[in-house]
Image (tube, coloured by chain):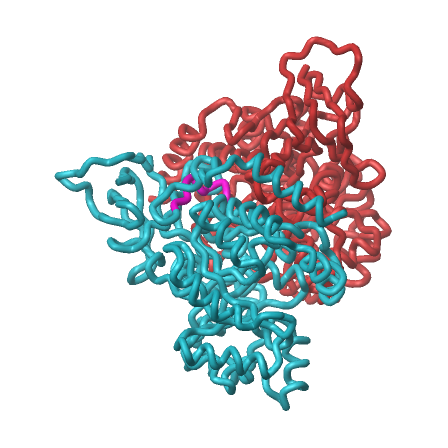
Chain colours: A red, B cyan
Amino acid sequence: MIRFYNGKILSFAGGVHVDDNCELWVKDDEISYVGPAAEEKPEFEREIDLNGDVIMPSFKNAHTHTAMTFLRSYADDMPLQDWLEKQVFPMEAKLNGDLLYEMTRIGIMEYLSSGITASFDMYFHNDDYVRANIDCGFRTVICSALNDFDKDPDNVEREYLKFNNYHDLISFCLGVHAEYTTGRDRLQFMSDLVHKYKTPFFAHNSETQNEVDSCLSRNHGKTPTEVFEEMGLFDYGGGGYHCVYLSEHDIEIFRERKLWVVTNPSSNLKLASGIAPLCRYMEEGIPLAIGTDGAASNNALDMFREMYLAAVLQKYLLKDAAACDPYKVLEMACVGGARAMGREDCDDIAVGKKADLIVINMARPNMQPVHNIPKNLVYAGSKENIRMTMVNGKILYEDGKFYIGEEPESIYEKATKELEKIMK
Amino acid sequence: MIRFYNGKILSFAGGVHVDDNCELWVKDDEISYVGPAAEEKPEFEREIDLNGDVIMPSFKNAHTHTAMTFLRSYADDMPLQDWLEKQVFPMEAKLNGDLLYEMTRIGIMEYLSSGITASFDMYFHNDDYVRANIDCGFRTVICSALNDFDKDPDNVEREYLKFNNYHDLISFCLGVHAEYTTGRDRLQFMSDLVHKYKTPFFAHNSETQNEVDSCLSRNHGKTPTEVFEEMGLFDYGGGGYHCVYLSEHDIEIFRERKLWVVTNPSSNLKLASGIAPLCRYMEEGIPLAIGTDGAASNNALDMFREMYLAAVLQKYLLKDAAACDPYKVLEMACVGGARAMGREDCDDIAVGKKADLIVINMARPNMQPVHNIPKNLVYAGSKENIRMTMVNGKILYEDGKFYIGEEPESIYEKATKELEKIMK
């Protein structure tokens, strides 16, 4: 058991609140006690003096392609289509399992240094991807990326069954890459799976105006959301990644179906896609979560960047400095992300929840003075404030050091070696 | 003397380049050698193994109000006028020299942790401000903030003479707060000073559409830039802070006069002011630098945030993922800032330049893999990458620790105590 004491606890039940003079115990993979210092204490393996720092639920990265770290700063500053067709797709064709394993580990390290403890990932080579996550001790939910180029669509069902009964850190969710890459036949194939397993469905959705326009012309005036809805893909919930350009009717569908909007503000800026109208979605009561997207388009995997942008871009978009509640943005990053990926068991601090926790170092100048901790986190927070990241009861990152089974330098070296093989 | 070896040197002369197998020596406050490992070496106080890391010219914060850290996360999420009139101005009226001193030290710590070695500052209580900078060993250029509320306008000239002959780390530049706070009489007073000392002039300029509109109606259709130009304030150069809404004629004046545009992307987003058209300014050959603005409006003092936004907001604004050269953005942050504030002596790495340097920790996951170092810095860099910050030949920050004459906890405690006095 691990004991955290002498600090503040930030949690979300009933709205963001910060409690003083509380302590928190972790037993195995769960939070076993939250409250005032207990009279009788069990034996602890380790007692951690928070020294006034804040312990809180970790961030969850609700949309990403973790191994795309392999393309970080490789092909920036290009028009979107050129970027995809001339750089990303040819390189992805060369991506193999060994390289993906190493690049996933680099992505996981970046997550940990940013206080992220779980990813909602969509990419290739899932066996190697899962191996990297388990080796590091990281939590992930894979979303299948079915599309017309898949040679073995039946693999989705095999992986669904396999990875949902594999390891406590791993789960698998049904999805397609996007409407524009997945024809009606394969969407019907996916809809059959959704109904067979009565399970949510996710996809890239309305990331660019061009995507929506081309869908409208292909589908007799229907948007991607309308196509998915028409085909019954949202019958058991789910949501969309990006959702920059939802129509009024799309918004109605998202609201009625309680579908998740997963926003990716940095990626949408850098690829010149646009700004998702998050405040509108909040007003409609649409559930929201935040993702970094992949390192090829962002280029960092940093929840502090995403939270800051999620908030301030709304102020810009609405020409109103009062727009967008930063408390809600913080909740999106911690609670929303967990729920979007179907992991309510790690969404907040409470007894019985998974111990997916971070400690915020308040003794850094960007957290001083302490007028308001949640606002400090959203508007001024950075990776330097992550003193500790715990996943499933295990400390994987502390004081700048990683505890994921191998030293960073060794991982970088292996990653570079694998990368060089395909760059030749 | 200090020797840096076994790393890469990033510098800007003739365009951004990264040189391998170079070393760099610092003697007193200057760079004394750059080149291949020398056969004969002098005695060094310290030899620093870069271990493959990058040493480069530091960032310069070309517009800020350092001590506004005292209002960080105190009054966010309000309409701009309410924010200023109901929160900022009443609190600033209570700000005293002791509090300003402590809050300046917190701001300086934040700068150092972000690789910033100099600030172009505009605020109050300059004696206490200067004392804080000298005590910490930090470089600053004060810009006078003359406006109609100043009780003692002659103090500008006294401070100009005093602080330009005071200390190697300190200089003083002429400026007014803004057109909208400074009437014609005081602008004329400032113009006389500019001509007397033949020196550049700076001011907040065209930060919001409202500021420009009100200026147009007050001044028979003239913009702030036109008013300043008409009164001869730009006869010896200078520039403007923010410059979100320059007119075509303003742009012509900036280009002809070689005036600096100092952009503050985060602050402009958070206060819903807008996005400065930096690519347009680049095309016109207008010199550019980057500032964080104060912590009340940003809320972080982090050059990585500003560089990222400077670049990606242009892509968004121009609906073109290829827009904005990140190499130029990096140069703005390092070289541009130094030159905007009249400190060409610390703008780049070269023998005889002031040793204002940073070491970038490449062994963090966000810098891996290493396809492109400048792009990694602009698109994925963060404060975790600042391994060392040197100002004027002295290491003030290294491996997360501050060497500014006092321990952080003691500074935070004093700052909080002073803050509590005025919050009562």
Looking at the image, residue B242 lies above or below residue B98: below
Q: Seen in the image, is B223 located left or right of residue B424?
A: left
Q: Position of residue A134 (x, y in %)?
A: 58, 25
Looking at the image, residue B131 lies above or below residue B186: above
Spot the residue most to the left.
Answer: B39
Q: Which residue is found at the position 45% from the left and 32% from the top?
A: A98
Question: Which one is in front, B336 or B355?
Answer: B355
Q: Seen in the image, is A385 located left or right of residue A316?
A: left
Question: Which one is in front, B37 or B80?
Answer: B80
Check residue B386 for magenta coloring: yes
Question: Which one is in front, A196 or B62?
Answer: B62
Question: Which one is in front, A325 or A227?
Answer: A325
Q: Position of residue B49 (x, y in %)?
A: 31, 34
Q: Which residue is found at the position 78% from the left and 23% from the top?
A: A34
Spot the residue most to the bottom.
Answer: B220
Name the quadrant containing residue A281: bottom right
- Highlighted magenta segment, given as a residue range: B382-390
Q: Could one spot residue B356 in this view of the protein?
A: yes
Check residue A266 for magenta coloring: no
Q: How many marks?
A: 0
Name the quadrant containing residue A314: bottom right
Name the image quarter holding the N terminus of chain B.
Answer: top left
Q: Position of residue B11 (x, y in %)?
A: 32, 54
Q: Position of residue B6 (x, y in %)?
A: 28, 38
Looking at the image, residue B256 lies above or below residue B207: below
Q: Seen in the image, is A163 located left or right of residue B263?
A: right
Q: Which residue is found at the position 76% from the left and 62% from the top?
A: B86
Q: Could one spot residue A265 in this view of the protein?
A: no
